[in-house]
Amino acid sequence: PPHLAYGVDGDHPSLVRPPLWSLAVAAGFAVAGPGAAALHAVAGFFFVATAVLAAVLALGVAGRVAAAAAGTAAATSPVLQLMAVGGLSEISFACWIALAFVGAARRWPPAAVGAVAGLAYLTRYDGIALLAVLAGWLALERHRDGPHSVAVALSGLAAGFALAALPWWVRNAVVTGHPLYALTGYNLFMAPGVG
């Protein structure tokens, strides 16, 4: 109900959650039809991708043995398994985080790393914290090259993030008048049995 006054309808169904997980699930539904199997297939894809990315990250940092250990640890992690079985956004969020760290470790252009952080943000709004972590990583990595190098890297990171998030911000500005508007504060009150 608190959404209706802000233009929520069939074309704009949510102001609580960012769009990326819903779009991924919608793609699964378009391919396999709406149902639990499609939802679990999408979540399964992100689960496998997260385990693979954990292995890729460890491979670049510590070699093959570490890659095998990291990939196995991720694939057998009860937390990741629970996130995948739950069919909620957490498993895709974990995947975007892992991809962002792979990009940072492999020295992708900062704008590309920022764009991946933007995808994490578009999956869960608390993904904005990833941007701060990646900024710290880039600043530490580039500090030997001087302040100009750090500034360029951080600007690229921010630009990539903003470019990924911009369509959603524009949508929110059109619907609500504020680009960063969200009703996440209502989540607690909308939960069954609370209030």
Image (tube, rainbow, N blue to C red):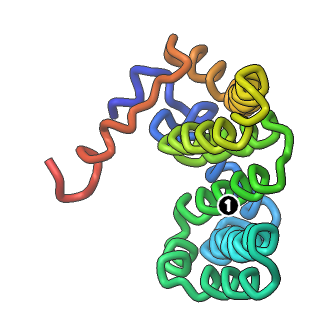
Where is the N terminus found, in terms of image quarters? top left
Q: Picture coordinates of residue 173 (x, y %)? A: 57, 15
Is residue 111 shown left or right of residue 80? right
* Residue in view at x 51 percent, y 11 percent: 177
Check disc 1: other Cα within 10 Å, few if <14, some if 14-19, many if 20+: many
Whether residue 26 is visible to the viewer of this picture, yes or no, is no
In this view, the residue in front, 105 or 52, is 105
Report the number of numbered marks.
1
Quick check: 78 left or right of 37?
A: left
Q: Is residue 138 above or below residue 71?
A: above
Rendering coords of residue 4 (x, y %): 41, 27
Q: Residue at x 80, y 74 (%)?
A: 59
Compared with residue 61, is residue 22 higher up or lower down, i.e. above or below? above
In percent of the image, x 47 and y 23: which residue is there?
181
**Which residue is labeled 1 in the image?**
98
Pinpoint residue 44: horizontal percent, then vertical percent: 68, 76
Q: Is residue 93 above or below residue 153?
A: below
Q: Quadrant of residue 93?
A: bottom right
Q: Looking at this view, is 69 or 6 the one in front? A: 69
Return the x and y of residue 56 as percentages of the image width and height: 79, 71
In this view, the residue farthest toward the top is 177
Which of these two is toward me, 97 or 179? Answer: 97
Q: Is residue 85 visible?
A: yes
- Left or right side of 186 for 117: right
Residue type highlighted by circle 1: Ala
Q: Secondary structure at mark 1?
A: helix
